[in-house]
Image: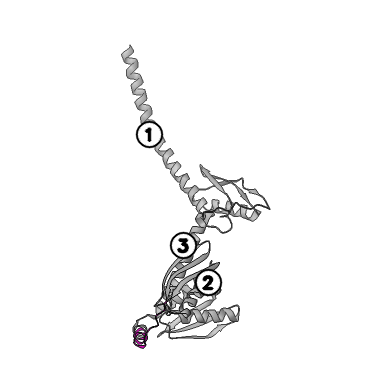
Amino acid sequence: MQFRKTVFASSFALAMAALSGPAIADTASQNLVEARQETQIWTTYALSPYLRASDLKVSVHAGKATLTGTVEEGVSKDLAKQIALGVGGIKEVDNKIVIQPDYVPAKSADRSYGEVVDDATITTAVKSKLLWSRHTDGLTADVDTRRGTVTLQGTADSTADRDLATRLALNTRGVMAVDNKLVVKNAKPTAAESAKAMGREAGKDVSDSWITTKVKSTYLYSSNVDGSDITVSTTAGIVTLSGKVDSGAERALAIEFAKNVRGVKNVHAKGLTL
């Protein structure tokens, strides 16, 4: 009798294990989905300039996202809800975020995830603009960005090149300040070296499509030129600009930035109007 009971108990345990196996797998899969949803929502908050300073928390269960934390305005609370609803699989949002008009988030000594991404983007943009410039062949610059402040270190052939690096960096979207630590080389190039440099510049084969792309990208990165309203075309190194700008200062910058791109022989901007 005892033997039969033992066999029955063992059989029952094995049957339950067999039945629970798929359930455990389904639970693990669901947990993974919910973790991904939480990460996607939180990452979007961290990258948003309107929400990154808020201490928001997210939890997801069975397609329902629960939001907690504090924001300064109702529009930010609604934005947080809409972002969560935009994530695949989220069907409902329990928005427990508190609105506090005088809310001042604690400033951390460490950069937030969003700030790190912004700084990396700025650094890439500044490096690209320096690389594309026709005047920076002799420039050796390390670029670092922290909370919108760009630091340039290295050497430049002349004071003019050093000042140009500052100007290019300062006119980059998101840059708050530039700390230019570039050192101007004392040795002046000889006439022969200058002639060789001019020969190298003249001999460079830069395609028109490359020039057009870099001019457009320069506008995209720039904080003082709205490139979305400017049409750029290039023929035999001559750049033609057309479209609308908001001011004479913006027009002048658009022309200057185009002239600065490597391979540009001239800029025609009669079609660029206010």
Q: Secondary structure at mark 1?
A: helix
Look at discs 2 and 1 and give the one toward the viewer.
2
**Residue type at the position of mark 2:** Leu
Check if residue 194 falls in the magenta segment.
Answer: yes
Q: Most extreme residue toward the top, as rendered? A: 1
Q: Residues within 10 Å of mark 1 (few under 14, many from 20)?
A: few
Q: Most extreme residue toward the right, as rendered? A: 101
Part of the protein shown in magenta = 185-198
Q: How many marks?
A: 3
Q: Quadrant of residue 32?
A: top left
Which residue was labeled with disc 1? Answer: 21
Check if residue 220 falls in the magenta segment.
Answer: no
Can residue 232 be seen here? The reply is no
Report the disc number at residue 120: 3
**Residue type at the position of mark 1:** Gly
- Left or right of 99? Residue 120 is left
Q: Earlier in the sequence, mark 3 or mark 1?
A: 1
Q: Secondary structure at mark 3?
A: helix
- Left or right of 98? Residue 45 is left
Quarter containing the C terminus: bottom right
Q: Residues within 10 Å of mark 3 (few under 14, many from 20)?
A: some
Q: Earlier in the sequence, mark 3 or mark 2?
A: 3
Look at discs 3 and 2 and give the one toward the viewer.
2
Q: Residue at x 47, y 82 (%)?
A: 259
Q: Position of residue 223 (x, y in %)?
A: 54, 71
Depicted 151 relative to depicted 261: above or below: above
Report the disc number at residue 170: 2
Q: Position of residue 117 (x, y in %)?
A: 48, 59
Q: Position of residue 8 (x, y in %)?
A: 34, 19
Q: Quadrant of residue 203?
A: bottom left
